[in-house]
Image: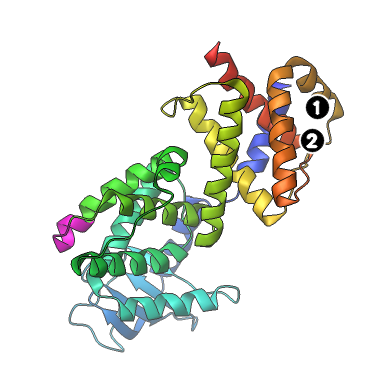
Amino acid sequence: MRVRFLILTVIQHVKYKSAENQQEKEYFYRGCNMKILKVLNNNVVTVKTEAGEEVIIMGCGLAFGKKRGDNVDESKIEKIFTQTREDKNLYKKLEDTIERIPAEYIDITEKIVKLAEEKLQMKLSDTIYITLSDHIYFAVKRFGDGQSLKNILFWEIKSSYKDEYLIGQEALKIIKDTVDLSLPDDEAGFIALHIVNAELNENMMNVMIITKIIKEITNILKYHFNVELDEENQTYYRFIVHLKFLAQRLLNNTTCNHSNDDELFNVIRASYKESFACTEKIFKKKKKNYNYSFSRDEMVYLSIHIEKLRKEWN
């Protein structure tokens, strides 16, 4: 039963391109002769490869003193953005963002993304270079004008996305070191949301709804068992990671139904009666609120996670 659960969990959570694939792609482009098409700032250029493909290249000082037609110094390449038929719009938005926003904010974003990918051990969606650069630039402008934006989801973000929030706090230090301005902790929460957005490859509104769904589920759990949840606990952390993907499937109306294993479902229902009862309560409320029908696999996954938490309370 445990082996089945592990296999299903792996299938359920493998959603991202590996860092190795990205590195292989960048290695391929590094071997090409690339001519500068446009200098976007001292650190970013658009180039055309030998194959005629247009890409954006980023690197510290890579474009300093350069002009159209010059070759790119490969030793300074740090990041390569390619375009496909599917993401031409994204590529154009990225180019526009880099031209519009001062270079230091692109540099700040690059440092934050590197930090996040190292800490989380995953490749983030390139959309974060657009959304986060934009957010930080206007947050600094707003705060400099004496205005600050209250983060109404601050506590939910802090408890549901612990790792991302800690990265957000480190991001505030990067911003302070670069533009000599201390932003409030609310901004660490906003930055964390942008990171989650790039993890799940969702838009910001959907990430906020996912955060709300996670909070609703943890509240049902607390009141069902009459307990206070230990947010520093590793089992709780794994539970929240599971809820993040569960909420995304709910929002996108997709189901996790890989096994159709009635035997496993019946074993979990009989063995983890209290946890299964809580799962049923959660799913009934979510079906009512979001008109989403949960599969038996979803009930199995969630019941196992809740049972692990319950054992630590007893």
Residue pointed to by mark 1 = 265
Relative depth, front residue between 65 and 10: 10
Q: What's drawn in magenta, residue-wise?
A: 175-181
- Is residue 79 visible in the rendered image? The answer is yes
Check disc 1 and give the amino acid type. Answer: Phe
The image quadrant of residue 174 is bottom left
164 horizontally vs 253: left or right: left
270 horizontally vs 142: left or right: right
Q: Residue 91 placed where, x, y %?
A: 47, 76
Is residue 179 located in the magenta-colored stretch of the structure? yes
Residue pointed to by mark 2 = 296
Give the residue at x 48% y 32%.
237
**50 is higher (above) or lower (below) than 104:** below
Contact, mark 1 vs mark 2 (Cβ under 8 Å): yes
| Prevailing SS of the magenta stretch | helix
Q: What element carries label 2?
A: helix
